[in-house]
Amino acid sequence: MQDSDPTTQRSEPTPAPAGTPKPALMSIDDALGLDAAAVNRLAAAHMNPGQIATLKLLGFDRIVIDQAEGMHYTDRSGRKILDFFGAFGALAFGHNHPRILAARHRFAAEHRHELAIAFLSQYAATLSYDLARIAPGDLDYVFLCLSGSEAVEAALKLAERAAGPERSTVCYVEQSFHGKTRGALSVTDSEFYRAGFRLLDHVHRVPFGDAAALEQALRADPSIGVFIAETIQGGAGIVVPPDGYFREVRRLCDRYGVLWVADEVQCGYGRTGKFFAFEHEDVVPDVVTLAKSLGGGKTAIGAYIARAPVFLKAYGSAKTALIHGPATFGGMGEACITAIEALHVLYDEGLIDNAAEQGAHLIARLEALQAKYPDLVTDVRGRGLMVGVEFADLHRVLPRGTRALAGRFDERLKGGLAGLVGALLLEEHGVLVAFTEYNRNVIRLEPPLVVTRDQVDTMVDALDDVLGRGFTRIAMDYVRRVKLTRT
Ligand SMILES: Cc1ncc(COP(=O)(O)O)c(C=O)c1O
């Protein structure tokens, strides 16, 4: 490999013993010493050059984070950034929760084992018990893996086996996001992510939140044996279905003998004010997926939890048990003890109730902003701490005659008042929010569940300050503060 970054400091190569020579590798200390420009250069050469253009547009490429604690990142200059992004819901506990860190340190200090391939793992067994205790009904069987995509992938395979070969068509919903592995992508409603890949063909799409359309599909196509949906859609721009939708889904799935897989990778784990978002409707799916915050913000772990008869039908015998058993790293020791301690913190600190309380306050304050700036903010929606703020299309807010201006900043900003606002929130107020690929007008707010009322007020006050300038000044300030200050 050519040296992509000759300006980067390297640690002195240690004299190698005889044998395979050690390449001029960068070390941990080298990594910790990199500035923003060097990180960008390495990422451009070895990771994903195209991604950097988007980060530049938002001014995110200039920031190197050195520390993170609770609700805040701290950058190289010591500036604190308030995290209302929360890694798309993966940071229920904020950053580096002390109890979760302590559990991990203890595990390492005791030299516990990680890979439970030869012997069963007491940590994986305990975590599975805890998840089954939390899950309602007979959601009793837990599969542990490493990511949301893998959990969805495994849940779809489980459901397909339990449904049987005659019922292998999977019904999914419009604007869904379930991950980027091939099975999960096959039920993800995005031409952008699908990008022409060859995917599963036994799928059927229906509108989200429309029980009549689901019934029509189930009646018309008896090969549909599985229905998958996020309980609240994240990637779509925070879409909450009408009240009663999932009660109808449950009734229809029972009536037509279809297995319902609830994807709660983003909306689950207490974020909406209940551990599972489907609990708001007092129903139980056949399989539920979790990931993101399950790892306490410190480790990669995903899971599905399946109803006992479904799991046992698919994999219940000694002959079928290992068809889709955990892979090498599924249920690793440190991941499991992290997840076990995180579940205790979730309840001990009342974080599910805090999500409900702070979420209600956040939504009420944002609705007041919508009333104050009806031309700029077109919708506020969500449940608990899963909140979307939709902004007007640029063509609606630009003064007539200047609409071509938007295209001059950058093609990608055309639909994006949300982008301008988000960039200014970060640049001027140190507040980080998340964007949405499917609907670029939506800013997603999924702060850690440890957020306080004061921090909610800080975030909303910052948004008020930006919106109060009106569109023209927002655009000018963006150009002045974010675009023109580039080195
Ligand atoms: C609802 C949902 N399902 C699945 C996934 C995929 O999870 P991962 O990124 O861990 O593979 C995501 C990720 O954003 C998600 O939001």
Image: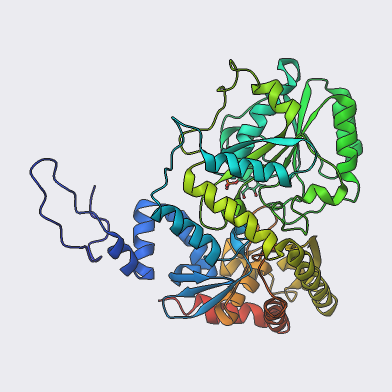
Measuring 62% from the left and 71% from the top, which residue is drawn there?
A: 422
Measuring 65% from the left and 41% from the top, which residue is drawn there?
A: 129
Query: Relative to 64, is 307 above or below?
Result: above
Quadrant in the picture for residue 94: bottom right
Q: Nearer the viewer, residue 448 or 458?
A: 448
Measuring 64% from the left and 65% from the top, which residue is drawn there?
A: 448
Q: Nearer the viewer, residue 186 or 294?
A: 294
Quadrant in the picture for residue 7: bottom left
Q: Residue 111's x, y, as percent?
A: 38, 49
Instruction: Please indicate, yes or no, whether residue 398 appears anywhere in the rendered image.
Output: yes
Quadrant in the picture for residue 440: bottom right
Tell me the quadrant of the picture where the C terminus can be found: bottom left
Q: Nearer the viewer, residue 331 or 24?
A: 331
In the displayed structure image, the side of residue 58 where residue 110 appears, left or right: left
Counting the numbered discs, the total is: 0
Q: Residue 308's x, y, as percent?
A: 73, 30
Q: Residue 190's x, y, as percent?
A: 66, 43
